[in-house]
Image: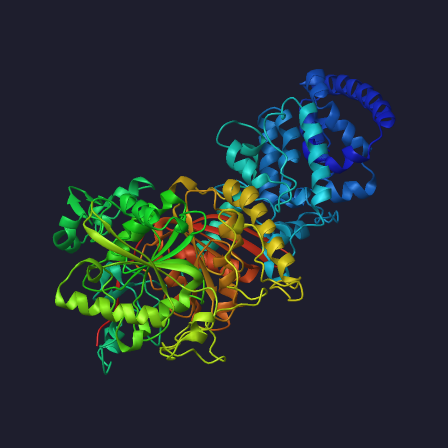
Amino acid sequence: MALGKYSRVDARKSSSGYCSTVTIVVFVALCLVGVWMMTSTSVVPGQTTDVSQENKNEERTPVTEISSETKNDAANNEETNTDNVQNDEGKQKQFEDNPGDLPEDATKGDANQAEKNDVPEEIENPTEEKPEEKSGDEKKDDGDGSKDDSEDGEKNKVEVNQDSEAGENKENNLDNEQTPEGDSGKTDGEKEDGQTEEKADKDNSTEKKDNSSEVFPSGAQSELTDESTTQNGSFSTQATESKNEKEAQKSSGSENQSQYSWKLCSTTAGPDYIPCLDNLKAIKKLSSTKHYEHRERHCPENPPTCLVPLPEGYQRSIEWPTSREKIWYHNVPHTKLAEIKGHQNWVKVSGDYLTFPGGGTQFKHGALHYIDFIQQSVPDIAWGKRSRVVLDVGCGVASFGGFLFDRDVLTMSLAPKDEHEAQTQFALERGIPAISAVMGTVRLPYPGRVFDIVHCARCRVPWHIEGGKLLLELNRLLRPGGFFVWSATPIYQKLAEDVEIWEAMKQLTQAMCWELVSITKDRVNGVGIAVYRKPMTNECYEQRSKSDPPLCQDSDDPNAAWNVPLQACMHKIPVAFSERGSQWPEEWPARVQKAPYWLSSSEVGVYGKPAPEDFVSDYEHWKRVVKNSYLQGLGIDWSNVRNVMDMRAVYGGLAAALRELNIWVMNVVNIDSPDTLPVIYERGLFGIYHDWCESFSTYPRSYDLLHADHLFSKIKNKCNYMALVAEVDRILRPEGNIIIRDNVDVINELEAIFKSMQWDIRMTYSKDKEGLLCAKKSLWRPTEEEKVTYALA
């Protein structure tokens, strides 16, 4: 049989002397059989077909199939045939080209095609049939025909835009942490042998790079994506062989589509519907809105399962970095901010575009000058080195965070959904991280002591009232030794109200032991900037004459942040070496790849290893998956990807592995998962706590790519499964992609659901009860609206 360059096991085990002897014998046999075949063909024209079919039922050995191509083809396939003769019986059973690997119709189609065309194409087919099944180890032929093998082939089905996705092996389930560390030596050895065989095979030497070290054993997924569009090689034949199977799958999918029915959401918010922020029924029942309760989350008891409509004229978002300067008007068709903030260079309307000059209330002449002026005032800030993760409160259209990317800084921009129409929606459409939230009555959904800097530029937050409760929330979030950058009129104006606020802030910050590092005036923008630093010890707290604001109880967990009421108290500064917050993280980018100093080997990590080792294993795992699978094999155009969400992050390994790309990743740590969000921040990344039984606090069409690792199976056992599917549709942009890793039952169900929404299934793969699914959202929307009207009383 013709194993081609995938026959690495045989090549390794063959001795040179034995190989030479067998090569001579086979070559002579080939010549004799070739002469016999030519003479027999001239006498009985139909005999070639019989031989071909007979061989197909056995091993489809190419020796007997070389009828008219004679010595040239025999010489070209000499090495392949030599490998075939060397196979022992056990190896043949493992790697033999059994037609059961494909549906019966597809195998017959291949035979017919060989009869019509030339025989060498039939020689190539065994080489490329299901390479993902032959390269790994796992599949053993039982010689039982097509029934059992067809079932296995169905179980291990692969679709990548009519290409094949290589088997995903153990990386599919990080819950068991089967990162293939122990396999690295083996795969390296396979890689060396594979490269040797590729060099020997002139026809294939430039076709492929050996990807045997990747988590997908053969790497066929990424290779087919590259090759099938550029040449008429064996992979185009694979597409032909799979045609009937894919049509059968599509037919099956059409049957499943009838199980699901979709309607448009009927809501006063229309295309901008955020279920937990637009619940007017709950908002109208509030007894008070004094503390911005009406801007906080109020999720409906029954989360919606409808689809949010698209704005009229919606089109694919402009790519970064152009999107920072302009976006399509019809994607966010709101002009109110342009009318009231245009003179401050927030946003302007320009034909079919909304343009963003890069200004803000406190930096009319551009964010970059403002950013650099801050560092000139306080050099210790050191953007992109010491200071990596920033919280921007009251961000507006997030130009501050957008231009901090130029200084290698990651900014969590935050603003409420209020009369400043769609401000965070503008930010997200521009490709800038943002969350719709307000500082009201509960803690923000972030752990304590994680932000290097907190910034407020005329953010309209009354920091000084009610014992400084809101400023004390910033104190909880700010890393010991971190800076609070405040740019507001009380710093530089002498109006009575401004003077009063300044005096109140002065007393409050002194009582909180914040050091006033700098007060400067930016003469270009005509504003003043005050910079405060949080203490790194408890010495100041202990020396205060008055314990106001008080220290929090020892039982108060600063990391508890999901619907926890605000308190007007301060948490003590960690001082023990082993405590998080007692030391400043390493400078960026070193901090992204090193386990935090406070992860102890005596602690068990999420995957069962000592915590530091767990961290490293997770990182190495995702680097392999990203490099060898996600970037090459899923058919995703990464130039169109900017906003990414990891819906079930652990240590932030996926985000770390993607950091070289021009993207940002929102890491979501589920509230019922191990609290690893502080680890994510420690390595210079960011994220948020969330409960996926509820809607996420973002506008529709916010993300280009969603990643869900065993999320759906967990939600299915907890709450409304279809509501999560609808939420995914809501926050994913049209023509955006989702990558799902989960058990095979969930993968199969989601494939059918996505097809019912007319999504493009780019790839599915399943093996050992684990699966991978990549799907692309379409522009399709249902025409019928739900009778239930959301967001109404």
Please state, as top left, top right, bottom left or bottom right, where the C terminus lies in the image: bottom left
**Which color mode does the image show?**
rainbow
Q: Nearer the viewer, residue 637 or 381?
A: 381
- 5 over 744 or under it: above or below: above
Please identify the residue farthest to the bottom as the structure is shown.
Answer: 287
Q: In the image, is 316 to the left or to the right of 257?
A: left
Q: Nearer the viewer, residue 529 or 251?
A: 529
**Residue 606 in the image, given as x and y percentages of width and height:** 60, 64
Q: In the image, is 78 to the left or to the right of 237?
A: right
Visible residue check, residue 708: yes
- 391 over 231 or under it: above or below: below
Q: Residue at 78% x, 34% y: name it.
A: 12
- 717 over 775 or under it: above or below: below
Q: In the image, is 73 to the left or to the right of 242?
A: right
User: How many labels sit on residues?
Assistant: 0
Q: Nearer the viewer, residue 354 or 530?
A: 530
Q: Residue at 46% x, 81% y: name it.
A: 553
**Residue 248 in the image, given as x and y percentages of width and height:** 51, 49
**Residue 18 in the image, given as x and y percentages of width and height:** 87, 27
- 295 over 159 or under it: above or below: below
Visible residue check, residue 298: no
Please state, as top left, top right, bottom left or bottom right, where the N terminus lies in the image: top right
**Residue 260 in the image, given as x and y percentages of width and height:** 39, 63
Q: Nearer the viewer, residue 365 or 651?
A: 365
